[in-house]
């Protein structure tokens, strides 16, 4: 399963790392990246090296400031502007955008992600800048990095129209990477999993091939877990869910597994060992599973909690902390009973 875990997560993780490192990171792109200007015959190699050295100095000086800023209480952080730091990066961009456009574009990605978004909380400005870089960057690799980082912000904002527009903008580039476009498609689906959205209808079957009827899920608190038993964190999440549900012993809760395993026989043995006593869908096609593609998942485990009316209450890519899951579910059950959405015990 390690191979299949790597491919869907490759682009988002790469984008995050390049955005953090800045322009120098664009030099480490694979052979499919846009050629360096010296390779194209229009710029000597030592000029690009000079830009890298200049950028390294800027980030070396900025990093401690950003670390300290993120450690401040939110109210104090709101008073910060980082005006001098923003101006310094903008000057770097002006200096290098004609001689080394990829370096300048990467600096703008860093500015948007690390300063405007993560440090200052100016999400709208950050997303707008990343969208502009995704459309205008000379190098397709850098444009993809900008698109994915912009998509990450828009996903956290729950901005589906913004994500769709960003995907359309990047996909229109002649050098758009198919994997990046596919990842943006996934984000456009993932945004629909934000709390308050209706959970999408899925065509599911248990391991015996019997349909998992939507009617059996209505009127209950449904906990959907995407996992595979080969990945330790995902298997741990499955075991945690099974134990939490057993401890709650509440008939109003309905767990549901979405397995990315290919080996259905091994999956069945693990489910019996844990034990897991709730329905599990397994198409045997890993990341190409219809349910996984419909949900736009790029990481497992993934947990989605749905109320009796089919509205998403909670969603998380990655493991829920062991001490958090059972109290989380107990809290939802109590809240829904107070509202009259679940019958009393």
Image: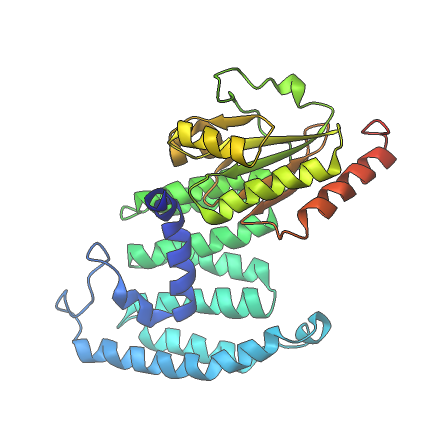
Residue at image location 43% in from the left, 60% down from the top: 16
* Residue 49 seen anywhere in this rendered image of the structure: yes
Residue 276 lies left or right of residue 251; in this view the side is left
Scheme of colours in the image: rainbow
Rendered residue at 45%/44% (across/down)? 298
Q: How many marks?
A: 0
Instruction: Identify the image quadrant of residue 181.
Output: top left
Foreground residue among 206 and 338: 206
The location of residue 178, given as percent across then percent down, is 31, 42
Please identify the quadrant where the N terminus is shown. Answer: top left
Task: Report the quarter where the C terminus lies.
Answer: top right
Q: Nearer the viewer, residue 179 or 98?
A: 179
Asked if residue 296 lies left or right of residue 30, the reply is right
Q: Is residue 164 visible?
A: no
The extreme left residue here reads 41
Q: Is residue 295 left or right of residue 338?
A: left
- Place residue 123 in its image quadrant: bottom right
Q: Residue furthest front?
A: 273
The extreme top residue here reads 210
Residue drawn at (36%, 53%) of the image = 144
At x 26%, y 61%, the residue is 29
Q: Position of residue 130 (x, y in %)?
A: 46, 58
Q: Classify 113 as above or below 285.
A: below
Residue 85 location in percent, x, y? 51, 80
Residue 76: percent from left, percent from top: 70, 76
Q: Using the image as rendered, state which of residue 154 and residue 234 is in the foreground.
A: 234
């Amino acid at each position: 399963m390690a191979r299949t875990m790597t491919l869907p997560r490759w682009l988002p993780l790469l984008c995050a790392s390049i955005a953090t490192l800045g322009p120098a990171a664009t030099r480490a792109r694979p052979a499919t990246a846009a050629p360096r200007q010296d390779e194209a015959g229009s710029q000597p190699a030592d000029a690009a090296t000079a830009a890298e050295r200049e950028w390294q100095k800027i980030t070396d000086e900025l990093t401690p400031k950003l670390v300290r800023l993120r450690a401040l209480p939110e109210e104090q952080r709101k008073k910060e502007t980082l005006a001098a730091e923003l101006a310094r990066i903008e000057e770097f961009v002006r200096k290098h955008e004609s001689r080394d456009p990829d370096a300048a574009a990467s600096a703008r990605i860093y500015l948007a992600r690390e300063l405007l978004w993560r440090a200052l909380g100016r999400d709208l400005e950050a997303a707008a800048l990343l969208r502009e870089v995704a459309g205008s960057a000379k190098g397709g690799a850098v444009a993809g990095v900008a698109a994915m980082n912009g998509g990450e912000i828009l996903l956290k904002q729950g901005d589906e129209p913004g994500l769709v527009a960003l995907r359309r903008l990047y996909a229109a580039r002649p050098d758009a990477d198919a994997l990046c476009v596919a990842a943006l498609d996934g984000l456009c689906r993932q945004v629909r999993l934000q709390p308050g959205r209706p959970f999408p209808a899925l065509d599911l079957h248990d391991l015996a091939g019997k349909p998992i009827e939507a009617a059996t899920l209505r009127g209950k608190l449904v906990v959907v877990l995407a996992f595979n038993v080969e990945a330790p964190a995902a298997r741990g999440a499955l075991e945690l869910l099974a134990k939490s549900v057993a401890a709650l012993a509440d008939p109003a809760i309905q767990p549901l597994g979405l397995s990315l395993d290919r080996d259905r026989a091994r999956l069945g043995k693990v489910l019996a060992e844990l034990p897991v006593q709730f329905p599990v869908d397994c198409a045997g096609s890993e990341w190409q599973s219809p349910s996984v593609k419909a949900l736009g998942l790029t990481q497992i485990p993934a947990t989605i909690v749905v109320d009796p009316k089919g509205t998403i209450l909670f969603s998380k890519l990655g493991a829920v902390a062991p001490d958090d899951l059972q109290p989380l579910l107990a809290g939802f059950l109590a809240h829904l009973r107070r509202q009259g959405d679940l019958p009393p015990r």
